[in-house]
Amino acid sequence: VQLVESGGGLVQAGGSLRLSCAASGLTFSSYVMGWFRQAPGKGREFVAAVLYSGGGTYYADSVKGRFTISRDNANNTVFLQMNSLEHEDTAVYYCAAGATTATLRTGYRGQGTQVTVSS
C-alpha cells in the first residue's frame, strides 16, 4: 500500500492550501481515509476523516469550519482543503487509511507533507 501526499508548502496566515493524497495497492472505496498532523515537539493529532463513499465526514474541533475533507473514489484520491490557515496549523500532514474509523490511526500512513503558515 502506498499513500503519497502532495500540496504542502509555505502560506501566509489567512491563506489556503489544498492537500492531495494518492492511494495505491488497496481497494480504496473499502477504506476510511483521513488526515493527521504533527507539529514540532507535539504528538500526532487527528485532523479529519471521510467515510467510504464520502457520505460522512469528521473534523477536529480546531479545524471545523475551516478545513474540508473529500474523496474521489474513481481516482483513489483524498483531499484536504484548508482555508483561513493559522500559524497553529503549521505541521507535517499525513494521509491515513483504515478499515474503520477505529483503526484509522493505526492503519496505513503516508510520508507526510509539510505545511508552514507564517504569521
Image (spheres, helix red, strand yellow):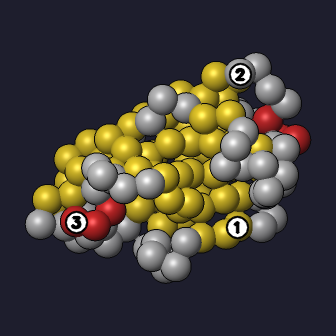
What residue is pinned by disc 3? Answer: 87
Q: Amino acid at mark 2?
A: Val
Horizontally, residue 72 falls left or right of residue 99, namely left
Circle 1 packing at 10 Å, graded few (<14), some (14-19), many (20+), is: some
**In this picture, residue 82 sits left or right of residue 41:** right
When the figure is inspected, residue 86 is found, relative to residue 111, above or below; the finding is below
Alpha-carbon distance for marks 1 and 3? 24 Å
Point out residue 116 in the picture as x, y percentages from the top left corner.
23, 50
Label 2 residue SS: loop
Residue 76 versus residue 66 in the image, above or below: above
Give above or below for 86 relative to 25: below
Q: Quadrant of the C terminus?
A: bottom left
- Mark 1 — residue? 57
Residues under labels 2 and 1: Cα distance? 23 Å
Q: Amino acid at mark 3?
A: His
The residue pinned by badge 2 equals: 1
Give me the residue at 39% from left, 37% from top: 113
Disc number for residue 4: none
Q: Give the residue type at disc 1.
A: Thr
